Amino acid sequence: MKVGAIVLMATVVAAGPAVAQQRTPLLPEKEVAALANELSGETAKRNLEGLARLHRQRGSAGFHAAAELVVERARAYGLSDVAILQFPADGKIFYGTQRSRPGWDAEVGELEEVKEAKEKSGDTTVKIASYRAMPIVLAEDSESAEVTAELVDVGEGTKESDYAGKDVKGKIVLVSAQPGMVQDLAVGKFGAAGMVSYAQNQKTAWWGEDENLIRWGHLETFSATKTFGFMVSLKAARGLRERLGRGETVRLHAEVKAGQHSSNYEVVTATIPGADSKLKEEEIAFSCHLDHQRPGANDNASGCVTILEVARTLQKLIGEGKLARPARTIRFIWPPEIEGTMALLNGKPMKFQTWSIDYTGETATRPHPSEIHASVSVFSGPELAKRIKAVVHMDMVGGGPETKAVFHVTRGPMSLPSFVHDVAWAFAEFVNEESYKFAATGEAKYPFVAPEGGKEPLRAEYSAYTMGSDHDVYQDSSFGIPAIYLNDWPDRYIHTNFDTAANIDPTKLKRAAFIGAASGYFLATFGIEQGRALARSIESQSVIDKEKEELRDRSLSSMDQNALRVSRTAYGLEALSSLSKFLPGSVSQDEIKRAADVSISRIYADYLNKLRLAGIGTSKFRREANLKGPLAVFGYDYFADHAKTAGVATPKLLSFEGLWGSGEEYAYEVLNFADGKRNAQEIRDAVSAEYGPVPLEMVVEYLKALEKIGLVKEVK
């Protein structure tokens, strides 16, 4: 079987012989039309403007205000089981591999330059940064302090040599690195009072071009060195460095009232209940992350308001009878990024408020206490993880032309093959075609254009798996939930003060909402016959662009070419098998066997036999089931923490750079592939097919390190 994207197009004949046929993907045209007509980029953007006003740090007053805003809208739109779930976060409780992080709030963050008064009436201070005016200037996890001290330039600030010959004790250091990378050295070892950072944004083609950008900063949550950090622009930092270079003395006054505190992860959730007596116990989830520094418009107010718009649209169309109520329940989730999802899938809420009343108006008031029903079923932990069959995750989906963003429909990891990724691509490709037709000719039946938005074609890309958001949690082998990941990259304003609502395109929001809504609704409604049609399409279509892969293969050894062929063939077969798991009875074992045009055992049986005889790479490892979630989570590294305690050296794999992937991605997939069935050589071949060849020794070393900290066990 070839490996590529499934594109199943249903031909729908419109009424009347003179009307041309319109090809729509997977759903009947009347349902595609209903979604296209109702989804509103403007409605989504109005909600985004509300969220972008709030500084939405985990466990903070600003995050709670954002949660309340989402709850109010969800109730107004008529959703069921609207709830805010609260999970304790005190720095000690673990949710799977995630150590909970205490909440963090700030009241004051003022940085001023103190100058000598030349005249009695003259102003002696110059404002440099103000939390009240722009919250992003105060680094997350800063602690209260009031300091007047000289500023010392230490360059990057991450190496001891940066401090050679410089007295920084009791002073404020100017650094180019993130404050969290510097605090233990600058403050903990050399006694600095605090930091001013001009750390730049993630590198893209536009890196460093706009010197007015201020990047959000953060300290290390669990560091024993408690201090503060301010963030300034490259332009402001250059001015300070030039003055210091000329021998000037620069004195700063920093006042901070902020700190960590025991709090709760708050997760907003709501549902559209399913109609089938059995299948309603299964759920299709829509996910995003609600937390971020203000403004955080594309990252990730855009994802939050887009799934809210999907919820409004589906609820309205179902209520009007334009869409049938889906067989499966559809759930919407607004958590803090990664850590909130980890709490939701691992723990039970300490308390929650739910609103089970249906509201159909555009406005709604806070319910009377008698209307709050704590008896409504609230699912979380393993029970919820078991119910969720697939996820549509949105993280940055609204970037307009100014952001330089490219929209991606990202496949899942090769460790979790699934047809659901190709369902999303079928709808994305439809939007690509229709929006391009409209942009090129001015005519298209489904242009997917918002009145206040742009008219450019979407040009979405179907991308290989990349890490960095809540989809990593769902698709980790301990949960095994396939996730459709819709995301923008690059975005030149990500994590900066310029990630504003002004740069968000309502047309982009509408298009992302359609791809997500259509994919989620299809997965929530389709049954045996549709499953069988999909299976036939999977058999006959390619899953990865063969020409592109063959071009890659030419630079590899014959051994690695064989390994790639094996892994891709296995991926294709397992993607077909995933349909059978999602919908039992839709695919027979005979169909799966018939789909294989290459015998895995025949491709390099001799090679495997030689390895077995030599005893190389034959060990098998199985992941322990008691700890759920990826290891590099949010603000906490489970592997690094436990490896230090166990005296395990850092494995070389973590810093390895492959042809198409980084060490973090290799490590994520090695753990996912450790199922007790694959040996180390087969795991090595699988991750090599995904990210480029990696030495077997590195994979074995990492598996052995995981064994020493109790995460995997060698299968004898």
Image: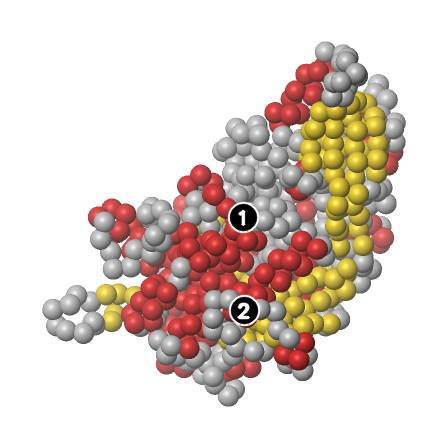
Q: Front-most of 648 and 91?
A: 91
Percent x, y for residue 8?
33, 67
Q: Is residue 637 visible?
A: no
Q: How is the image coloured?
A: secondary structure
Is 340 displayed left or right of 119 in the figure?
left
**Extreme-front residue of the structure:** 121
Please name the residue shown 62% across and 73% down the image: 367
Q: Quadrant of residue 18?
A: bottom left
Mark 1 or 2: in front is: 2
* Residue 206, numbered label: none
Q: Quadrant of residue 498?
A: top right
Please name the residue shown 71% across and 15% down the image: 243
Residue marked by disc 2 = 364
Q: Front-most of 61 and 685?
A: 61
- Marks 1 and 2, Cα distance to the nearest angstrom? 25 Å
Percent x, y for residue 296?
57, 47
**Extreme-left residue of the structure:** 18
Q: Front-most of 249 and 695?
A: 249
The answer to whether 328 is drawn above or below residue 126 in the figure is below
How many other residues sit within 10 Å of disc 2, few (<14), some (14-19) or many (≥20)? some
Please name the residue shown 78% across and 45% down the image: 258
Residue marked by disc 1 = 297
How many other residues sit within 10 Å of disc 1, few (<14), some (14-19) or many (≥20)? many
